[in-house]
Amino acid sequence: MKIPELRIADLIAKIPIIQGGMAIRISLAPLAAAVAEAGGIGIIGGTGLSVPELIGEIRKARQRTKGIIGVNIMFASSQFAQLVKAAFAEKIDLLISGAGFSRDMFTWGQECGIPVVPIVSTAKLAKISEKLGAAAVVVEGREAGGHLGTDRSMREILPEVRQSVSIPVIGAGGVVDGQDIAEVLQLGADGVQMGTRFALSEESSADRQWKEYLIQASAEDHLFIQSPVGLPASAVRNAFTDRWATDADAWKPSNCSQCLKHCTRNFCITDRLVKAQQGDMRGGLIFTGAYYYKIKEILSVQRIMEHLSQEILDYRLEAENA
């Protein structure tokens, strides 16, 4: 029995896993390269990086692996066009984008011969994406980490999308182990996207305290916070979220770096995410998928991929013998 490959345009990943492109310096070259080297698709989180920084991370990843390396750039970023075009100039293997929707990115991708993969939460947007030239779609549900475009479960949305498009469909949100992967593939997905499991890896660029905090958090610590992007976001409770809930006005920024196209200015999201990534567990904002509490240890990417592959095979074998 073999694990199915994931094909997107001319790209073939031996293991049908895309590592989530977690922004604000969680998913950088070491993580993306490790996933790509292990047979998945590694993604650099481009949002929050300057153009020179993104170019540098792409080149570092290329030095570490000949595997598939992509970039995730949030449409809501004020630097969206500059970052995408820089990534295309570096000949990345694919672009993933969410938190809004760009029609231009499909044209740019076609001009450069680079697959574009939007993150969608409805069959309607998936169909529009396919018509515009998307190479695949990532279907994200309420279980995902960070910014969310729906309050519906990915497992509810995915079959609707599968019936609506002929391009590859990737399930995202709440996928943390091999059984999850096998079940999402049974729903009709061609692959999965996993963020939190790889955020809690040795190669993730999050501070060790960030990782330990999430490992120790309980299911009851999960919450949704209204992001300055204008979307709800999935996070874990800490001192910042407690204080923000009782005195939101106290966190309005006095200075603004204009990192977003549109910002509600209820707090500075870049500042809070950077604080968390650097290990400030009281003042930072910790984005996470809903099922972080199922992850019990921080492992190398290689071991994570080995465990996931074996769990997929074990689940498929058990299902066949049932």
Image: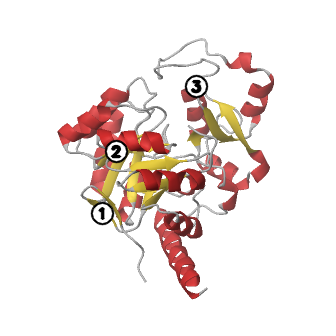
**Secondary element type, mark 1:** strand
- Reading the image, the residue beneath label 3 is 230
- Reading the image, the residue beneath label 1 is 12
Whether residue 265 is situated above or below residue 294 in the rendered picture: above
Cα gap from disc 2 to disc 1, whole angstroms:
19 Å
Mark with earlier residue (2, 1): 1
Q: Nearer the viewer, mark 2 or mark 3?
A: 2
Three-letter code, disc 3? Gly
Q: Quadrant of the C terminus?
A: bottom right
Q: Do the residues labelled 3 and 1 touch (CB within 8 Å)?
A: no
Q: In which quarter of the image is the N terminus?
A: bottom left
- Which residue is painted at 18% across and 37% down in the image? 111
**Residue 267 image position (x, y, % from top left):** 63, 22
Three-letter code, disc 1? Ile
Badge 3, how many Cα within 10 Å: few under 14, some, many 20+? some
Give the image quarter of residue 54. top left
Mark with earlier residue (3, 1): 1
**Secondary element type, mark 3:** loop
Task: Name the outermost residue toward the bottom.
Answer: 321
- Reading the image, the residue beneath label 2 is 130
Asked if residue 31 shows in the view, the reply is no
**Residue 275 image position (x, y, % from top left):** 60, 33
Three-letter code, disc 2? Glu
Give the image quarter of residue 254. top right
